[in-house]
Structures are given as C-alpha cells and as structure tokens.
Image (cartoon, grey):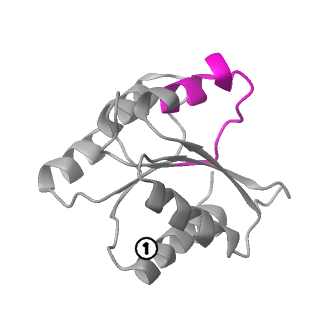
Amino acid sequence: MKENGRPIEMLLVEDNEADIRLTEIALQQSKLENRLHVVRDGEQALEFLKREGEYADAVRPDLILLDLNLPKVTGAEVLKEIRETSSLKSLPVVVLTTSDADKDIYESYELQANCYITKPVDLRKFMGVVEMIEDFWARVSKS
C-alpha cells in the first residue's frame, strides 16, 4: 500500500500467459495492497496509458512492468512513446524480460527505463523478483 493508503496500481505489459499468472500469484502473496492491470501487447499498453478506446476509464499506474518482446508494438517502442509523451514520461518503467542481450539492455536505458531485469527461469526466483520489484517501488523509492 502506498503512503496515502491506496493500493499500488501496477500495469503489466506481457504476452506470455505463464508469466502473467506467476506475476499475479507473486503479487497476491504480497503484504502490500496492489491492483494489477494486464495488457497483452504494446498497442493495448499505449491505449491503456493514453486512456483510449476500451481503456478510456483506465487508472494511471504507479508502476509499469514492461516486457520487450511484444506483438504489434514492441516494448522498446512502448517505452519510447512513454518517454516522449509529457503526461506519461514521469511514470516508472521496469523492463522485465527474458532477454539478457547487451543491445536490449543498452537500448532500454537509452530510452530511460528506470530498471532492467532479466526474468529468471526458475519459478521461485521469478516470483521473488516480482516481490522485490513491488517492495522496492512501493516502500523504498520516492515518487
């Protein structure tokens, strides 16, 4: 829960159903109150963030968990659009992806990702990473 007593609004941009489910489970086990919103491609992510179409009533997320390998619009393109849109550019974005390629890491930081994390393959480690992300952004960082 944020200091003001409201739940942490998180947007997960992920197309892999297994990773979505693991993230949901990890966040349900958290001691922090949160609401996870899920979109499954980059196009939906931008519509959600810009409150367009079916996402006209979407909340402004406190944190975005962004996969790079997305259909329609890539994660890098989503991140670029976020940073180029004045109403979105201050949103914290954690890139959470399977890629550990130097070019992806470099590009993500060039596009001003707040953090880059390679998804662990191990189930427990993956869930632990999600819990650490939430804990850091909700309790440690100041926004």
Q: Residue at x 49, y 78 (%)?
A: 128
The image shows residue 116 at horizontal and vertical percentages of 34, 57
Q: Quadrant of residue 34?
A: bottom right
For the question of whether residue 52 can be seen, the reply is no
Q: Nearer the viewer, residue 89 or 105?
A: 105
Q: Furthest residue to the top? A: 53
Q: Nearer the viewer, residue 18 or 37?
A: 18
Vertical position of residue 63 compared to residue 89: above or below: below
The image shows residue 62 at horizontal and vertical percentages of 64, 47
Magenta segment includes 55? yes
Q: Quadrant of residue 55?
A: top right
Q: Residue at x 83, y 54 (%)?
A: 6
Q: Residue at x 42, y 46 (%)?
A: 15
The image shows residue 21 at horizontal and vertical percentages of 54, 62
Q: Secondary structure at mark 1?
A: helix
Q: Residue at x 34, y 29 (%)?
A: 73
Q: Nearer the viewer, residue 32 or 22?
A: 22
Q: How many C-alpha atoms fall within 10 Å of the one at disc 1: few (<14), some, or many (≥20)? A: some
- The residue identified by callout 1 is 126
Magenta segment includes 58? yes
Q: Furthest residue to the bottom? A: 124
Q: State which region is magenta.
A: 45-64
The image shows residue 41 at horizontal and vertical percentages of 43, 36
Residue 121 is left or right of residue 138, and the answer is: left
Q: Amino acid at mark 1?
A: Phe
Vertical position of residue 74 compared to residue 66: above or below: above
Vertical position of residue 130 compared to residue 34: above or below: below
